[in-house]
Amino acid sequence: MIADIFLMSLDALRSHKVRTLLTLMGIIIGISSVIIVTTAGNSVSSFVQEQWNIFDPTGILIGIGTATDPPRIAFTGAVFTNNDVKKIQDLPHIKNVAPVGIVPIRKISIREGILKWKSTPGGTMYASTSSMLDVLKLEIDEGRIFQEGKNEIVVTKTTTELFGKDKPLKIGDVVYLQRIDSKTLKAKIVGILKETTEGNILTQLTTPSILGPTDPYYSTFIGSNVGSILHRITAYIVLYATATDKENVDKAKGEILDYLNSGASDASKYKKEKYDYVIVTQQYIIQRIDSVMGVINMLVTTIALISLAVGAIGIANIMFATVTERTREIGTMMAIGAKRRFILQMFLYQSTIIGLIGAILGCILGASGSAFVVQVLNTYLKDLGGTAFTGSINLNFSIEWFGIAVFFGVLAGIAAGVLPARKAAKMDPVVALRYT
Amino acid sequence: MLDKITIETHSLTKIYKTGKVEFKALNNVSLKIKKGDFIALMGPSGSGKTTLMNILGCLDRPTSGDIFLEGLNLSTLPDSQLAEIRSKKIGFVFQTFNLIPNISALKNITLSMIFAEVPRSSREANALEILKKLGLEKFTRNLPSELSGGQQQRVALARALANNPSIILADEPTGNLDSSTGIQIMNLLSSFNKEGKTILLVTHDASLKKYANRIITMKDGEISEHR
């Protein structure tokens, strides 16, 4: 019986192809926009995640600034001392900590003869300790790490080609680095970094071309406010740390803040009142991106669901029209023995079939539409300049949304059909037969 | 031999209400229809013939009075059982044919078998047999709109026969047909009557009286003449 009613409903839909198609359109558009929005959102979201996941998720940047949400690091005022670095290193959930002394280099020179020099504009040097490599997730391709207190540096491959690709700098070569305070320091290349696409919050800001020990390259001194004698103490603007693992990032953050605020820290002596300690974690950034993406997704999904509701109203509208138009048929069917239940089911199945077919076609259209949207986004991404991003947005379907879409499509069909079907089933056969 | 009573009514009254205005469509109609009767129900428009037919055909309920079909009191039955009686015991034929427009002639006939819960396997064969009997075997796959009026009415007759009912109710079956086609239809109804079916024919057309063995004339909701 159910199969018969189903076939009857199909017959009815088939006999009004244009009407059925137009009614379907409402649902198809609704469902496909839900699919496109969720798929595009999902794809972009996982792309952004990937972008940040290539950074170390245990990474923690320590600085001073304003601890608002989002926090702002003021890249000014060196307050963290080597003593602070050592104390933070000893905290239970800290794996590693490295001071980051940014040393802008005005000029890099090499000696080509006894009195012959060759120079090139320099880049940025990171002066730190040997734990910097681990903290910044950098690897040595050739040679070894610099030693503290010696005039040794590690350079990127690009730096070795500064004086021409044909005669790259080699391990053991000596260069002269002129800082912006005009002081020139000798440096022996002891290691060459492996090229990497990985990075972290810090390398995202400036790309270091040269890494060296703080002694002798870094010399930001601060005046102690103990008495009137000016102590010459090396201090850093930011520190970069890693937590023991992903789960302990927040604990590590708490420990660092506790230490810095305790008064036992040197930073507490040098930090100006108007600044707070600011700690930015990778996870914080990922969460921020997620929450922004979440809001956008919710907004657009709401719009898509509204369009689905409009589609459902379209079905209801056409079903009412169909019921009215078929009044005499309904009367006839009742006269030849159709029970009210049959009439109810027949119209309910019709609207459900529209909902189901609309949902399925909507999913197909939505899937291909998403592929198109992602392709367009990738084109824009390239136009924006590929350097800021690595890779491209991959089509990332959220399977559950296909299920949800089909469910809501069918639900919309059923909901839209209930009232018209009841109207049909409640007809008085005598009145219905007289209807012209 | 005592004739078997198929339908019996006791003081059937039907009152229609439109707002505060009451209209008595049937007034105290008592009537017995025997098995195998061919009754012509006649009378002017508004005399209550169609109302009576609808009540006899289980489509409508009387405001008061009782109606028995093969001994069963219909006034106490729920809608779903009335529908079942309509599908199994009664065949309807309408002036305007009333075929379902979007399905084939064959499907129009199997449709009433669906309502009578005839198993799917035997539906099509039964329907083909009936269509053949009425000379419609060529039109089984045609839509009603592809058939002439006479052909459509014959399909409607086939549909009325689908579940082998004991009673056929025909409301002006020739009203929309030319006279020669009308005669064909009346001859078919006559032949069904000879096979033992009880026929109730509602008509204006005095020339159809000759097919009937009983003529009931109605006026103002009452039976005015009965012979």
Image (cartoon, helix red, strand yellow):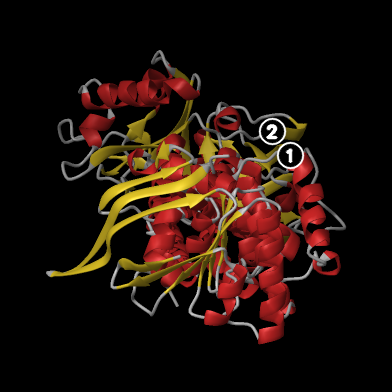
Q: Earlier in the sequence, mark 1 or mark 2?
A: 2
- Name the subunit of mark 1: A
Q: Residue at x 71, y 80 (%)?
A: B181
Name the quarter where the C terminus of chain A is drawn: bottom left
Pointer 2 local density, CA inside 10 Å: few below 14, some 14–19, many at least 20: some
Label 2 is placed on what type of residue?
Answer: Glu
Could you tell me which secondary element the residue under label 2 belongs to? Answer: loop
Which of B189 and A130 lies nearest the eye of the viewer? Answer: B189
Q: Position of residue A380 (x, y in %)?
A: 61, 68
- Residue carrying label 1: A194
Label 1 is placed on what type of residue?
Answer: Lys
The answer to whether residue A309 is visible is: no
Q: Residue at x 82, y 48 (%)?
A: B125
Q: Position of residue B107 (x, y in %)?
A: 71, 58
Locate residue A387: give its quadrant.
bottom right
Name the quarter where the N terminus of chain A is drawn: top right
- Residue carrying label 2: A139
Pointer 1 local density, CA inside 10 Å: few below 14, some 14–19, many at least 20: some
Q: Would residue B82 be found to the left or right of residue B136 on screen? A: left
- Name the subunit of mark 2: A
Q: Would residue A298 be found to the left or right of residue A276 on screen? A: right
The answer to whether residue A129 is visible is: yes
